[in-house]
Amino acid sequence: MEPKECFFQEQFGHCWLEDSQWLFQALDVREQPLGEPVKVELEELLFHHDEDEELH
């Protein structure tokens, strides 16, 4: 799945679905990865704008 821009606990990053598990990768201001991707629940994510209409 193509990563989508999103927020998790007010941290900007990318999220994607992998083997029916949502993962979140935090990004810094230069959009470089911060730490390792973490497993998250879909309801914990806030998606960026309208590119994710199919998820709602």
Image (spheres, rainbow, N blue to C red):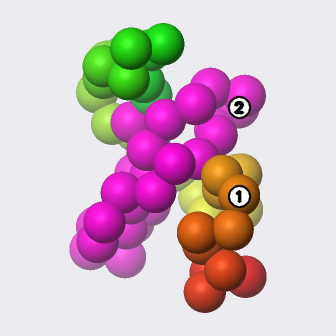
List the single residue furthest toward the top: 29
Compare residues 10 and 50 and report the one nearer the observer: 50
Q: Secondary structure at mark 2?
A: loop
Compare residues 19 and 13 and report the one nearer the observer: 13
What's the residue at 30%, 23% (across, down)? 33
Per the image, the residue denoted by label 1 is 49
Residue 22, position as x, y percentages in the image: 44, 61
Where residue 20 sits, quadrant-wise, is bottom left
List the single residue furthest toward the bottom: 54
Tell me: 41 left or right of 17. right
Q: Is residue 45 visible?
A: no
Q: Is residue 19 magenta?
A: yes
The amino acid type of the residue labelled 1 equals: His
For the C terminus, which image quadrant? bottom right
Residue 39, position as x, y percentages in the image: 43, 48
- Magenta stretch prevailing secondary structure: strand
Q: Is 37 rendered above or below residue 27?
A: below
Please rate how many residues cluster around mark 1, counting C-alpha atoms within 10 Å: few if below 14, some from 14 to 19, many from 20: few
The amino acid type of the residue labelled 2 equals: Gln
Segment tinted magenta in the rendering:
1-25
Tell me: 52 left or right of 17. right
Numbered circle sitting on residue 9: 2
What's the residue at 51%, 48% (across, down)? 5
Residue 51, position as x, y percentages in the image: 58, 69
What's the residue at 60%, 72% (across, down)? 52
Q: Secondary structure at mark 1?
A: loop
Q: CA distance from mark 2 to mark 1?
A: 17 Å
Mark 2 touches mark 1? (CB < 8 Å): no
For the N terminus, which image quadrant? bottom left
Where residue 2 sits, quadrant-wise, is bottom left
Q: Is residue 55 magenta?
A: no
